[in-house]
Image (tube, grey):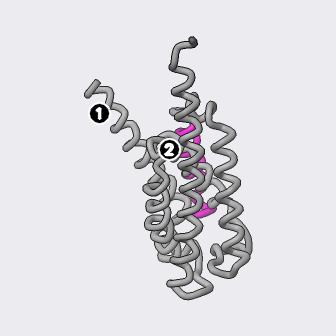
């Protein structure tokens, strides 16, 4: 049992590290580095094809909600991504990669709504501030407004993720229970 926990924890850590590479390639390299970003995401899907296939509807919903939230923040004039007035291709791929990582490495958060919301409130704005630092985006408002907007956005998105992950956990538990 303990070796299984170590393997699972190591596997989750590897997924998070690969996603960090995806994030760096997408944000620091943007469109010119899609040749790195897309294969890394492909690797994430290849290694996790079975769980991601089972969660494909939730994954797609989460990506679409995330992209809608990004579009909304742009429309509100909080931030603009460099080189475009809309959503750049690298950002769309980044959302696909994040969802793949989240539904495999962070699925343990399912049903832990407060923890999910706190993760979003804290880490969401940090990643966008880092993106601004890399030149991937520019703030159109004050730093305080950007932090508040992205904290609310990510707090909400992570709560949705938490709900979706919990739905899959319940479905898996129901499949494991013997029929009466």
Residue at screen point 55% across, 64% down: 154
Residue at screen point 63% across, 75% down: 82
Q: Report which residue position mark 1 lands on.
A: 6
- Work out which quarter of the rendered image holds the N terminus and state it: top left
Residue at screen point 69% across, 40% down: 57
Q: Residues within 10 Å of mark 1 (few under 14, many from 20)?
A: few
Region rendered in magenta: 29-46
Q: Report which residue position mark 2 lands on.
A: 110
CA gap between label 2 and label 1 equals: 20 Å
Q: Is residue 130 left or right of residue 174?
A: left
Picture quadrant of residue 34: bottom right
Q: Give percent across and percent down for residue 173.
A: 51, 27
Q: Is residue 45 magenta?
A: yes
Q: Nearer the viewer, residue 109 or 28?
A: 109
What element does badge 2 sit on?
A: loop
Q: Nearer the viewer, residue 114 or 129?
A: 114
Q: Give percent across and percent down for residue 112.
A: 46, 49
């Amino acid at each position: 049992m303990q070796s299984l926990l170590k393997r699972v924890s190591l596997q989750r850590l590897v997924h998070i590290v690969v996603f960090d590479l995806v994030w760096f390639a997408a944000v620091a390299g943007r469109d010119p580095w899609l040749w790195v970003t897309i294969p890394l995401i492909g690797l994430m899907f290849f290694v996790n094809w079975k769980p991601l296939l089972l969660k494909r509807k939730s994954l797609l919903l989460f990506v679409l909600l995330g992209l809608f939230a990004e579009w909304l923040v742009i429309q509100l004039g909080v931030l603009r991504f460099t080189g475009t007035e809309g959503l750049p291709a690298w950002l769309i791929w980044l959302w696909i990669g994040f969802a793949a990582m989240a539904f495999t490495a962070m699925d343990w958060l399912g049903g832990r709504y407060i923890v999910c919301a706190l993760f979003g409130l804290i880490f969401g704005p940090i990643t966008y501030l880092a993106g601004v630092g890399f030149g991937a985006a520019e703030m159109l408002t004050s730093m305080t407004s950007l932090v508040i907007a992205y904290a609310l956005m990510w707090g909400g998105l992570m709560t949705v993720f938490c709900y979706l992950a919990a739905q899959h956990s319940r479905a898996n538990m129901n499949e494991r229970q013997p029929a009466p």
